[in-house]
Image (tube, rainbow, N blue to C red):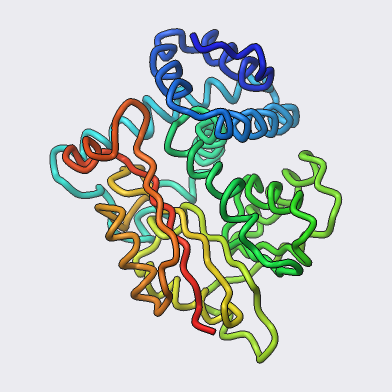
């Protein structure tokens, strides 16, 4: 196993996973082995967030580790089998995802718990978050107003809150439950600066008045859940100030029970951003654990695609 003597949070998380699922050790070893020191540093901070968020759950970290195994074996693997047989995602409409996933609260709790662990363990997730913290956030101009659409566990808002050059932070979500969970998570993570969390459907938001809006918008793992991702990007772009940027993280070839829009390559992800009338100023592709980008392309394996788009001045 990788030397985690300098990474106490990761060591605690990996130890818990070993107790719950020792057969997964080889995967974890491969995932950690391909990370630079900078990425490992961000993964250590993400693991620290996971440990803190685990404190609020009955069963704590062991519960999260069990839910992570449930995610891998019972949620993702069957969808992967379907994807391999049919070359498409099993579901294609939001109503189907709502019926099978979002309306099933116990299922969604385990699903979201497992995903939280994956941000530290899966190579593609770890590298995507690291690119946000190490590259994107430092690129924002001073006094930036930042919005995240669908903030979920609050991890990206947590890192944005540490960037004191941002003037304001906000999050929009369509679910009152999700808003409440994000608010609770940010409090658990010790975020002390104000974060405005609003129940807001992006498609109903209209367009910001002159001077209103945001300098930065984050949409992480949102587009694959939508039937019309370009329309969503256009709706978000209306809230960007001139010269503002949008950070998009969308997985390609990544089957899951609530993924309905198939992005099939990093270039496809760029096309979505361009289709919203935005200029692509940066693009990164992070393949799943244990493979290269070339092999992921040929084998249609999961890749986290990060695209930064800019609204014209």
Residue, x 46% and y 53% (percent of image)? 249
In this view of the protein, can residue 2 be seen by the observer?
Answer: yes
Residue, x 16% and y 40% (percent of image)? 298
Q: Is residue 4 above or below residue 71?
A: above
Q: Nearer the viewer, residue 94 or 216?
A: 216
Q: Is residue 227 above or below residue 110?
A: below
Residue 285 placed where, x, y %? Answer: 37, 47
Residue 16 placed where, x, y %? Answer: 59, 14
Q: Nearer the viewer, residue 256 or 248?
A: 248
Q: Quadrant of residue 56?
A: top right
Q: Nearer the viewer, residue 104 or 313?
A: 313
Q: Is residue 54 above or below residue 109?
A: above
Q: Is residue 176 above or below residue 114?
A: below
Q: Quadrant of residue 211?
A: bottom right
Q: Where is the C terminus found, in terms of image quarters?
A: bottom right
Q: Of all residues shown, which one is farthest toward the left?
A: 85
Left or right: 161, with 228 as reference point? right
In this view of the protein, can residue 99 be seen by the observer?
Answer: no
Q: Of all residues shown, which one is farthest toward the bottom?
A: 210
Left or right: 70, with 85 as reference point? right
Residue, x 37% and y 25% (percent of image)? 73
Residue, x 65% and y 79% (percent of image)? 213
The total of numbered circles placed on residues is: 0
Residue 100 placed where, x, y %? Answer: 39, 47
């Amino acid at each position: 196993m990788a030397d985690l003597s300098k990474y106490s949070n990761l060591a605690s998380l990996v130890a818990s996973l070993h107790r719950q699922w020792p057969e997964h050790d080889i995967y974890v070893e491969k995932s950690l082995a391909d990370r630079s020191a900078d990425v490992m540093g961000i993964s250590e901070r993400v693991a620290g967030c996971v440990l803190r968020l685990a404190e609020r759950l009955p069963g704590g970290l062991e519960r999260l580790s069990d839910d992570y195994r449930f995610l891998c074996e019972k949620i993702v693997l069957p969808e992967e089998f379907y994807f391999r047989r049919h070359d498409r995602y099993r579901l294609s409409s939001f109503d189907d995802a709502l019926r099978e996933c979002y309306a099933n609260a116990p299922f969604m709790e385990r699903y979201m718990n497992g995903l939280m662990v994956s941000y530290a363990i899966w190579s593609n997730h770890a590298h995507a978050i690291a690119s946000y913290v190490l590259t994107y956030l430092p690129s924002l101009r001073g006094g930036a107003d930042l919005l995240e659409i669908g903030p979920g566990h609050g991890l990206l808002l947590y890192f944005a809150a540490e960037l004191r050059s941002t003037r304001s932070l906000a999050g929009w979500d369509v679910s009152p439950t999700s808003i409440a969970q994000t608010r609770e998570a940010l409090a658990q993570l010790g975020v002390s600066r104000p974060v405005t969390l609003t129940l807001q459907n992006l498609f109903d938001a209209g367009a910001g008045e002159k001077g209103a809006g945001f300098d930065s918008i984050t949409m992480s793992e949102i587009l694959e859940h939508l039937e019309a991702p370009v329309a969503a990007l256009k709706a978000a772009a209306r809230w960007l100030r001139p010269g503002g940027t949008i950070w998009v993280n969308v997985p390609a070839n990544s089957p899951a029970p609530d993924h309905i829009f198939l992005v099939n390559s990093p270039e496809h992800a760029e096309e979505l951003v361009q289709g919203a009338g935005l200029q692509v100023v940066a693009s990164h592709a992070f393949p799943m654990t244990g493979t290269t980008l070339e092999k992921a392309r040929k084998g249609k394996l999961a890749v986290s695609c990060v695209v930064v788009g800019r609204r014209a001045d």
